[in-house]
Each structure stands twice: as structure tokens, then as C-alpha cells.
Image (tube, rainbow, N blue to C red):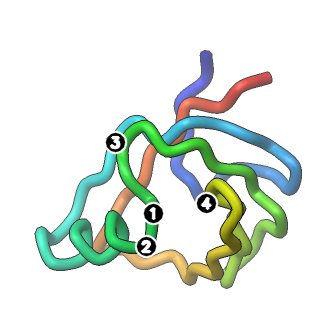
Amino acid sequence: MLVVPLEMMSTGEQGRVCNLDGSPELVVRLEEMGLREGASVRMVRSGSPCILAINDHRLSLRFDDCATVLVEVTR
């Protein structure tokens, strides 16, 4: 399995969040939105902002240097 930062995923790629790192407040906010360790994600549209599919929800995110989300990409 390949582990990459979330922002490096291409449109259509899927994976599982394996690590969240950043300020505690930001990590908690991301977790509240469903982006937590173990969550399955699919990149609907890459870029900034990107659109992620998490379960039955869509989430638009701008990447920030204050947090790093690592994803184990499934091929």
C-alpha cells in the first residue's frame, strides 16, 4: 500500500485515512467533519479546494499547512 498526503491524491483515487497531524483544534474539527483515522475517502475532484467523498457525504477542503492528513491509497 502507498501512503500519501491527502492533497497528492488524484481524482478517482480511494484510500483510508491512516494519520492526522496538526493543531489539536484543527484535528478535532476535521474529525467532526468525518475525516478521521480509519475513514474511507475518495477524491472526487483534486485541487484546492478539493472535493472528497466520505461515506455518503461530500466535503470541500482547502489544504492548509497547519494540518497533514495521510492516506493509504488502494490501487
Q: Position of residue 32 (x, y in %)?
A: 33, 71
| Numbered disc in front, either 4 or 1 | 1
The residue indicated by pointer 1 is 34
The residue indicated by pointer 3 is 19
Identify which residue is drawn at 45% across, 60% down.
Answer: 35
Q: Earlier in the sequence, mark 4 or mark 1?
A: 4
Distance of mark 2 from mark 4, alpha carbons?
A: 17 Å
Distance of mark 1 from mark 2, alpha carbons?
A: 4 Å
Q: Which disc, if any, is residue 7?
A: 4
Identify which residue is drawn at 65% across, 54% down.
Answer: 55
Residue closest to the eye, 53 or 23? 53
Do the residues under discs 3 and 2 have CB atoms within 8 angstroms? no
Q: Earlier in the sequence, mark 3 or mark 4?
A: 4
Distance of mark 4 from mark 1, alpha carbons?
A: 17 Å
Residue sticking out furthest to the top:
1
Distance of mark 3 from mark 4, alpha carbons?
A: 14 Å
Q: Give the secondary structure at mark 3.
A: strand
Distance of mark 1 from mark 3, alpha carbons?
A: 13 Å
Q: Give the secondary structure at mark 2.
A: loop
The residue indicated by pointer 2 is 33
Do the residues under discs 4 and 1 have CB atoms within 8 angstroms? no
Do the residues under discs 1 and 2 have CB atoms within 8 angstroms? yes
Left or right of residue 2: residue 19:
left
